[in-house]
Image: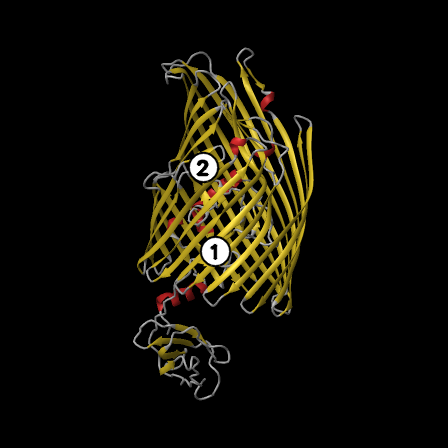
């Protein structure tokens, strides 16, 4: 208390140190009543140091904690106000880049040197349990059936289109990534692997602030952009712009043994794909406080992408002795166009009682993807010279996904430790896809339609769902239980075939969570959920043949059923001041799992299609260690799992029973107050998968960041893939053929980036003050 006025002093800092030690054994901050308590101290003699801004420090000596008297009350401590200027006190705060919670793990990535100047996919590559393959497909724990959210809203983009979008979203726009492997009934149930939520920077602090970014690399990559924030009274605005230009070649090869023929024959394919995207991305967020309890918000995202692409491939036919018997090549050139627009209008009402809220949101998404392409195919003599006329074709493909959503959420405390959450979401998803392919008739000297590769179809899906959830807390025990009910109906209409496929089904998605806080440092949790993956992608449904090339086709299956998954997780967590450890054993059971199947015919043409297998089970465990200590901070994560699938209903050869694991580590060392160095290493060994085996994969990146002008200017140098390990190799085994596939993306290089900020937000300045600038 104040020695003169006898008033309680709040927010005073208390440190307890055992005799002979220099590091405090416990800390606390006084409450509004001036009280504090420090628990879990070992027996011994302590000294208590009490400091409050504007008062002289007081140290209480010889405070004994013995077995006979484990509780000690030091009584009332009077502090004297200090009229003299205090010396600067340096307070060191270790920022937590990894926050491990019962329902989600959060990774703060905004200051990671290994992501500076990169894109959102580079950010995800830094997160444990998340993987991004060479085609930019995102997966969680090895499962690509994952819902990727942006600012808490599920993205309607399909995996390939979403990967392209994330590759043009600047990493400097990303604030943090949340991993939710076992979501509750409150969340959208789509995505059997769980949810990855990418949280963008979209908050402005008091006043005006902004920044500019420019980076370039030896690979031809150029990133540029900026952001601007403004907050004044009830109005808050934040906007950002990003530009990307890139040039990254990719090599691909296939060596296939065709067992249809006796003696067997071989096909050796090798090709190079070159993509040169030009992309622009705009984001904006506006919030207006109508009055103290009401708030309106508008979020808008818009992006465009133009991409020149070429793919040259050479085919070599070999006999059983490996002697060349045929030679041909094929060159595809085209220009792809993509655009994406998303807008969400939100309203939130806060009632008088704390935690009592009502929120509503309406959102629309309008996307487009496609463009023209031209093909020239030639038969070559064994010497490599052209033989005869070239075969020419041209095609144009387009996809227009649309989505409209409305949702309402209501939260009401029923008692001090009991809360009810309920809500509704309605969604209408539509997409229209068209493909027009024409081949050149050398006799008539005109392009004529290829009816086997012309299609036009529409897909409409409506989902209405509601949920209710109860949360309770009693002492060290936390309970949560919920149920979501949905009705879904879809119609797939294939115009070119005059066929229509209708589906309608109801689903229940229960969830439960039990968490027990053993003490302030240890927690045990058990969670359960049921989720769904709906077959609503054009590639999965469209039965029309799509050519990667004439010897490699893909066809969809319009009769696919949705797959359901039940997941059970046990979480064990220990949280310390500098070290947090989390171990999560899990079990997942999937019914009607969708799998891709490769077949080959007597002509040597390989076709990929899709089917529902009976069941797929996975069980194993994740482990994450987060460290924030002195000059070092970072995390390491590993996952080991056993996969068992039963595909007897499709083909016995597709079933597997195999073990796998993967690991990742990210470490940052503070070389000085203005220089950070960070490294990322990930490894996945060879694994058995359905119908084959994947080879091992390694990723390594290194980066350094130099802060200048009081951190208003920073310079980042990234060394990307120095050992040129960005490659994916696999084998496919079938009684009819054996195939080795190899793919590599050329991303090795140096990337140099500059970023400058102005009008630094007040909150960041306070963080700088706590991290070493001194407290007057």
Most distant residue in the bottom direction: 4
At 51% across and 31% down in the image, what residue appears?
A: 653
First in residue order: circle 1 vs circle 2: 1
Answer whether labels 1 and 2 touch (C-beta < 8 Å): no
Q: Position of residue 761 (x, y in %)?
A: 45, 62
Instruction: Name the mark on residue 336.
Output: none
The image shows a total of numbered marks equal to 2
Taking depth in this image into account, of 240 and 195 the one nearest to the observer is 195
Q: Position of residue 13 (x, y in %)?
A: 41, 75
Is residue 117 visible in the rendered image? The answer is: no
Taking depth in this image into account, of 614 and 392 the one nearest to the observer is 614
Tell me the crowding category of disc 1: few under 14, some 14 to 19, or many 20 or more residues within 10 angstroms, Cα based.
Answer: many
Which residue has dot 2 on it?
688
Secondary structure at badge 2 equals strand
Q: Position of residue 35 (x, y in %)?
A: 48, 80
Which residue has dot 1 on it?
106
Tell me the crowding category of disc 2: few under 14, some 14 to 19, or many 20 or more residues within 10 angstroms, Cα based.
Answer: some
User: Which of the two discs, 1 and 2, sits closer to the camera?
Assistant: 2
Secondary structure at badge 1 equals strand
At 65% across and 26% down in the image, what residue appears?
A: 496
Q: CA distance from mark 1 to mark 2?
A: 31 Å
Taking depth in this image into account, of 285 and 561 the one nearest to the observer is 561
Asked which quadrant contains residue 385, the reply is top left
């Amino acid at each position: 208390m104040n020695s003169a006025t006898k008033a309680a002093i709040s927010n005073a800092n208390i440190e307890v140190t055992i005799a002979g030690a220099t590091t405090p054994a416990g800390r606390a901050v006084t409450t509004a009543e001036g009280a504090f308590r420090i628990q879990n101290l070992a027996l011994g003699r302590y000294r208590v140091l009490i400091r409050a801004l504007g008062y002289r420090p007081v140290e209480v000596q010889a405070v004994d904690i013995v077995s006979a008297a484990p509780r000690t009350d030091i009584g009332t401590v009077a502090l004297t106000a200090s009229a003299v200027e205090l010396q600067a006190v340096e307070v060191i705060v270790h920022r937590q880049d990894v926050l491990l919670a019962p329902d989600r793990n959060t990774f703060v990535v905004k200051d990671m040197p290994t992501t500076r100047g990169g894109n959102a996919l580079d950010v995800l590559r830094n997160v444990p349990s998340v993987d991004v393959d060479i085609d930019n497909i995102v997966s969680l724990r090895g499962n690509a059936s994952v819902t990727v959210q942006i600012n808490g809203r599920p993205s309607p983009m399909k995996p390939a289109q979403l990967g392209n979008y994330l590759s043009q979203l600047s990493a400097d726009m990303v604030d943090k990534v949340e991993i939710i492997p076992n979501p509750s009934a409150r969340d959208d149930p789509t995505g059997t692997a769980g949810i990855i939520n990418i949280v963008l920077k979209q908050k402005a602090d008091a006043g005006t602030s902004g920044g500019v970014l420019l980076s370039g690399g030896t690979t031809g990559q150029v990133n540029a952009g900026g952001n601007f924030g403004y907050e004044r009274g009830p109005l808050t605005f934040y906007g950002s712009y990003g530009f990307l230009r890139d040039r990254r070649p990719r090599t691909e090869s296939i060596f296939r043994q065709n067992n249809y023929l006796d003696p067997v024959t071989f096909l050796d394919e090798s090709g190079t794909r070159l993509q040169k995207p030009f992309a622009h991305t705009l984001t904006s967020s506006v919030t207006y406080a109508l009055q103290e309890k009401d708030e309106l918000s508008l979020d808008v995202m818009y992006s465009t992408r133009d991409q020149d692409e070429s793919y040259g491939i050479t085919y070599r036919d070999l006999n059983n002795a490996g002697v060349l018997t045929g030679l041909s090549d094929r060159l595809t050139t085209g220009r792809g166009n993509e655009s994406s627009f998303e807008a969400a209008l939100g309203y939130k009402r806060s009632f008088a009682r704390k935690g009592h809220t009502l929120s509503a949101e309406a959102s629309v998404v309008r996307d487009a993807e496609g463009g023209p392409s031209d093909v020239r195919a030639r038969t070559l003599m064994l010497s490599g010279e052209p033989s005869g006329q070239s075969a020419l074709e041209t095609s144009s493909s387009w996809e227009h996904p649309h989505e409209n959503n409305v949702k309402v959420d209501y939260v009401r405390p029923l008692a001090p430790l009991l809360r009810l959450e309920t809500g509704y979401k309605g969604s209408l998803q539509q997409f229209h896809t068209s493909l027009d392919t024409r081949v050149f008739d050398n006799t008539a000297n005109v392009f004529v339609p290829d009816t086997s590769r012309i299609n036009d179809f529409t897909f409409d899906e409506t989902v209405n769902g509601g949920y209710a959830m109860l949360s309770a807390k009693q002492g060290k025990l936390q309970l949560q239980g919920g149920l979501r009910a949905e009705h879904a109906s879809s119609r797939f209409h294939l115009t070119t075939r005059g066929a229509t496929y209708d589906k309608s089904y109801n689903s229940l998605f229960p969830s439960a969570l039990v968490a027990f806080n053993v003490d302030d440092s240890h927690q045990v949790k058990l969670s359960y959920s049921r989720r769904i993956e709906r077959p609503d992608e054009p590639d999965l449904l469209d039965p029309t043949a799509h050519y990667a090339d004439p010897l490699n086709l893909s066809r969809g299956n319009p009769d696919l059923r949705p797959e359901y998954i039940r997941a059970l997780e046990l979480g064990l967590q220990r949280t310390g001041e500098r070290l947090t450890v989390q171990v999560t054993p899990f079990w997942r059971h999937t019914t009607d799992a969708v799998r891709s199947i490769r077949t080959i015919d007597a002509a040597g043409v390989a076709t990929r299609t899709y089917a529902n297998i009976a069941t797929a089970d996975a069980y194993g465990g994740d482990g994450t260690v987060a460290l924030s200590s002195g000059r070092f901070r970072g995390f390491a994560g590993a996952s080991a799992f056993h996969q068992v699938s039963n595909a007897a209903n499709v083909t016995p050869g597709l079933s597997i029973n195999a073990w796998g694991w993967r690991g990742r580590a990210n470490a940052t060392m503070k070389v000085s107050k203005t220089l950070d160095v960070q490294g990322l290493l990930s490894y996945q060994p060879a694994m058995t998968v359905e119908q084959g085996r994947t080879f091992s994969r390694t990723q390594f990146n290194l980066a350094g960041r130099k802060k200048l002008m009081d951190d208003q200017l920073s310079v980042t140098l990234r060394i990307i893939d120095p050992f040129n390990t960005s490659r994916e190799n696999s084998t496919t085994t079938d009684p009819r053929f054996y195939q080795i596939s190899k793919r590599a993306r050329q991303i090795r290089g140096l990337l140099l980036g500059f970023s400058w900020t102005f009008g630094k937000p007040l909150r960041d300045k306070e963080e700088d003050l706590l991290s070493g600038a001194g407290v007057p």
